[in-house]
Amino acid sequence: MSLSSALNSVQSIFNNTGIQSSVVSTNISNSGNSDYVRRQASVTTSLNGAQVVKIDRAQEDALLKQYLKSNSQDTAQQTLLSGLEDLKSLMGGNDYETSPATYLSAFRDALQTFSASPSSTTAAQAAVTAATDVANSLNNASASVQKIRADADSQIATDVASLNSLLAQFQTANDAVKQATATGTDTSAALDERDKVLKQISSIIGVNAVTRDNNDMALYTTDGTTLFETTARSVTFQSTNTYVAGMSGNAVYIDGVALKAGDGSSTTAQGSIQAELQIRDEIAPTFQSQLDEIAKTLVSMFSETDGTTTAPGLFVWTTSTGAVGGTPTTGNVIDGISATISVNTSVITSQGGDPMKLRDGSISGLTNLNTDGSSGFSSNLDALYSALGTAQSFSSDAGISSNVNLMTYATNSIGWLEQYRSDATTASENTSAALSRSNEAYSNETGVNLDEELTLLLDIEQSYKAATKILNAIDEMLKSLLDIAS
């Protein structure tokens, strides 16, 4: 080997190790960055010696695709579970101590006590107070359900704004990738940025990414609606600040196509928006209907009649126009009746009423069943107590059994929520585990392993040392030649 060839080899080694050490150093400095994909300098050998020809990026499209899917599913499932937990909390948590079922049970007991002591004013007032607690629990539950819907609507608006922002960022990142690809420069940093934005998008909406010529990428929702193709498509939503029972929320439109809500406890939703739509438009309204069915049945069950006319008795309600509602006769859900149900002021002592009217069946003023004015009259109280245990016809639109007594129906409503929440919890554990496995598999292939990088850095150091030894040897030979020449 000539001295010039040796010098060229040394220069090549120095150039290669410089590039390699720079790449390894960059990898090490990003070892804790989950959005960074490991780089590696590719060295090839030719007649001109070894040289770094390109910087490879440890890209794994299949694993990234699986991660995006798992991330969308888990985000949706966790969002759904959070909404169900909120519904459970408004019912009093694990024991459901503030649920209508709990207060109905206390009211039934108070009614039985009053029946056993029909002359007791204290027992009468206790029964009225228990009835008031039932009405208040329905009022509070209805208001809380609608607040959950409003909160979901507000979060949808936030997510839509975030999605539009991310799509704009994606367009910038995608343009940078295309430009780097077209000019032949290193695309690694631009690809990292694009993948980072893509992961964030997948948390909000299920996304399918398609790579095209020149490293261009197009994005579609899981049902095929275009999210991004050359330019970001518009995602629109008109938020509603306040909800009442029976009100429908506005749809989310992607490129003019309405986004579907998720379905089921193991939700079909992909990303947070579809899960929030499911909470707002399916779960909360169904639970609201169950509350309305309980309220409707109470008004009807405790109504009074003279054989010709029927009027509300112990429980009254207000229509959407503000008028006092009559006795419900429809088999359909009366939207919002649980929000306005209250105890008739005719039996509330503090408002000039007489609680004994409950005993006598004279609350509405139509009749007086206690015609003799007997202090021991309990027939009406016994009948009302029995009615609470008699099967009723409930609307099937409320999603639970329709031919059970009121007490069972109220308990079944809690059971419906608890079963939904329990199934959603199991599903959330599964999606969380799937996301963890997907993330681990993706990180193992694309992430930085400090041990591997430090080992590679030692190999590069050895190459550098070998080059310096060769350079020293050449230096000695040149000195010898100059000494001979002189």
Image (spheres, rainbow, N blue to C red):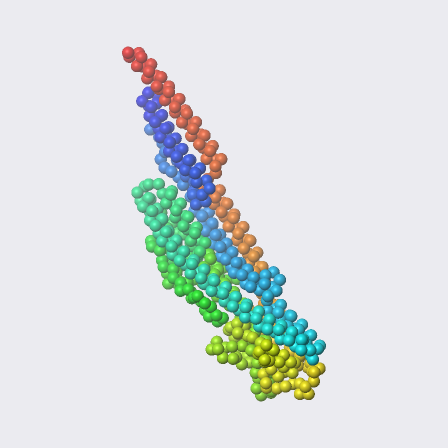
Q: In this view, does 122 lie to the left or right of 9?
A: right
Q: Quadrant of the C terminus?
A: top left
Residue 469 appears at what percent x and percent y?
A: 40, 22
Q: Residue 190: percent from the left, percent from the top?
A: 37, 45
Q: How many marks?
A: 0
Residue at 47% in and 35% down: 452
Is residue 215 shown above or below 352?
above
Q: Residue 143: image x %, image y %?
A: 52, 68
- x and y, in percent, of residue 425 in the image: 56, 57
Q: Which residue is found at the position 45% from the left and 54% from the top?
A: 203
Query: Foreground: 44 or 321?
Result: 321
Q: In this view, does 214 lie above or below 137?
A: above
Relative to 379, 208 lies left or right: left
Q: Nearer the viewer, residue 149 or 446?
A: 149
Q: In which quarter of the image is the N terminus?
A: top left
For residue 2, what is the image quadrant?
Answer: top left
* Residue 419 visible in this rendered orientation of the protein: no
User: Does residue 82 appear anywhere in the picture?
Assistant: yes
Q: Which of 355 and 193 is in front in this view?
A: 355
Q: Vertical placement of 273 versus 410: above or below? A: above
> Quarter of the image holding residue 208?
bottom left
Front position in the image: 420 or 56: 420
Residue at 39% across / 30% down in the picture? 17
Q: Residue at image x 57%, y 84%?
A: 310
Q: In this view, does 274 lie above or below 481?
A: below
